[in-house]
Amino acid sequence: MEKCIERPRNLCSLHGALDVVGNIYRAIPILHASPGCSMQASNRTNLYYLGGYHGLPSSNAYEKEVVFGGTQRLYETIKGSLEIMDGDYYAVLTGCSMGINGDDVGSVVERFSGSEYPIASIDTAGFRGDTYTGYNMALLATVKALAKKTETDPLLVNVYGQPPSSDITLRGDFEEITRILARIGVKANTFFIRRDGIEQLKNSGNAALNINLSPWLAKNVDAYYKHEFGIETLNLNGWPIGPKDTADFLRIIGERLGIEKELVEKAAHEEELYVWEYLDSLFGNFERHRFILVGESAKALGIARFLVNSHGHIPLAVVLTDSVYEKDRQKIRDEINNLDCPRKADVYFESDVYEIEQIAKKYEGRATLFMGSSYEKKIAQKLNAFFAITSNPCLDKEILNRSHVGTHGCISLVEDLYNHF
């Protein structure tokens, strides 16, 4: 083994695919995998069926199926799942062992093509990549299986680019993005969490625009929507967070969709004013921090822009924990280097907790605020820096609909940064 990662937060492609299907309401993932893969995958994923980690069918393939093939066992598993599991979309996800033995999963799934509900086959054997590979594969396969085109809705957008379980505030974040877009009359398909997620996916071919929140993820989905439905994609460098980002976001969407400028400016001004009316009361007790930020690029870029450009904090280091492709890394570095601060942040791409601690030690005596996951909490204590949880995994508290994005969400973020306990 070339490298052992301490406390990995990015897992195999099966987890990423299960994260997609498991977070669509009334979508049923069916695993063609060994019991160990099935159990570990479900334990690390937020499944949205019957309220928790229940209802995950698996072929539970043992040595016999690995050696002699498990297509018959898979057929029985799918047949039983369709009879027992009450869903509207089914997806067969393949684990490593069954990916290695060469089972023709597609032909088995094809036997159920006459089913009342759509069923897809997605080859997500873990050796094909990590969480983000699985996310890309499963989201594309799901869109292919469900999305249809009837008539373009000029005020409908699709929002994606964030793996559900990798964002600790995803539910609240999607609610905030939906609220912001509604200010200018735009409807948002967010696919995940909402009870009408499958209907949103079916209707996504009628959108006038895609909004991809990630600077590097889901480019295959962008291309499919363009090729099949003629839908262009607006690629953002991370979530819009804070008054300036939110106002700019509204203006960009308004321009792309041809929305009346007066309406857009009114909404943008009111959203900005909302934040400043709250933050004005903070400036009498304002503490400017020198910060280290650890997290996934889509969220970390938005947080960094807000803290520096709108709130006046000083960036020391930004550590990106997702598996950003080498070709996309310079774009992210440039975004961080363009922050409105003479002191340019050092940029790292690292997910290993041990390596992140070694990076953090470089700033001992200088860093006063450390933001990251529960894994980084002890590192912050060693630096004698304040700590706030802003990224996955969050093991210290329960988060239901709290948000860190937009204008309402940035208020919650500021509270988290200043309420040290």
Image: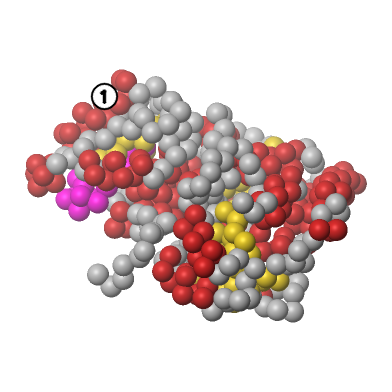
118 is higher (above) or lower (below) than 215: above
Which residue is nearer to you in this view: 358 or 267? 358
Question: Residue 185 location in percent, x, y?
Answer: 78, 38
Q: Report the side of 260 relative to 199 (left or right).
A: right
In the image, residue 274 lies at what x, y percent? 84, 46
Q: Taking 9 as reference, is 172 left or right?
A: right
Give the amino acid at mark 1: Gly
> Is residue 251 shown to the viewer in this render?
no
Q: Which residues are magenta?
A: 90-106
Q: Residue at x 51, y 59 (%)?
A: 377
Residue at 57% in and 54% down: 389
122 magenta-colored? no
Which residue is under mark 1? Answer: 80
Packing grade of label 1 (10 A; few <14, some 14-19, many >=20) is few
Q: Position of residue 143 (x, y in %)?
A: 48, 42
Secondary element type, mark 1: helix
The answer to if 92 sits in the magenta stretch is yes
Q: Is residue 148 left or right of residue 187?
A: left
Residue 391 in sight: yes
Q: Is 78 located above or below residue 209 in the figure?
A: above
Residue 25's place in the image compared with 86, above or below, is: below
